[in-house]
Image (cartoon, rainbow, N blue to C red):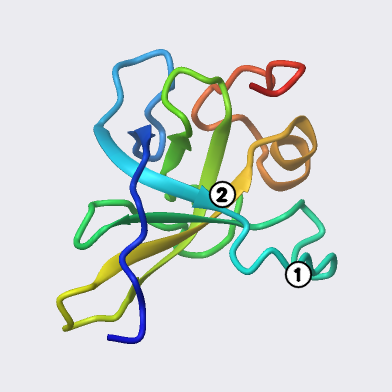
Amino acid sequence: MAFRVPNFNLNANVWRATHHVSAPPDVVCMCNLTPGKRVMQSNVFDLGVPMEVLLTAHQDVRPEQEFNPASTDGDCMEIPAGSGRYYWIVGVDDVAKGFSNEYRLAMALLLTTYVRSSVFSNNPWNCPALPLPLP
């Protein structure tokens, strides 16, 4: 058991691709939001700091398949639920697969105005602007 199971201490709302955030979420789950090892690598994404969303094993969270504005099929998560902080899920994989301490890891980008305007030809989830200051 090389990994300790994280504490899933935040409620999150999840919307599937093309579902607007004004509608009820498709999934409600518990998660943990972290920048990973807390070693910021500015060249990883020009779009901001990639965050890690840690979830219970087998949690149904879907990643972007092509990183293509025309195919926007990744999920949108609001973490914490009700905060107005929306994240685009760009990758999902499992940690400690097959062991009793398995959990799921999703890579996410905060949906800032810059990300929405530089990546998407529209705002596929109809997310409002980030609240300032950030909650």
| Quadrant that contains the N terminus | bottom left
The picture places residue 99, in percent across and down from the top left corner, at 18, 82
* Helix, strand or loop for disc 2: loop
Which amino acid does the dot numbered 2 rest on? Ala
Which amino acid does the dot numbered 1 rest on? Val
Residue behind mark 2 = 70
The picture places residue 9, in percent across and down from the top left corner, at 37, 40
- Quarter occupied by residue 132: top right
Residue behind mark 1 = 44
Along the horizontal axis of the image, is 111 left or right of 19? right
Dot 1 or dot 2: first in sequence order is: 1
Q: Residue at x 82, y 59 (%)?
A: 46
Quick one: 118 or 135, which is closer to the camera?
135
Along the horizontal axis of the image, is 81 left or right of 37? left
Q: Residues within 10 Å of mark 2 (few under 14, many from 20)?
A: few
The label nearer to you, 1 versus 2, is 1
Quick one: 123 or 82, which is closer to the camera?
82
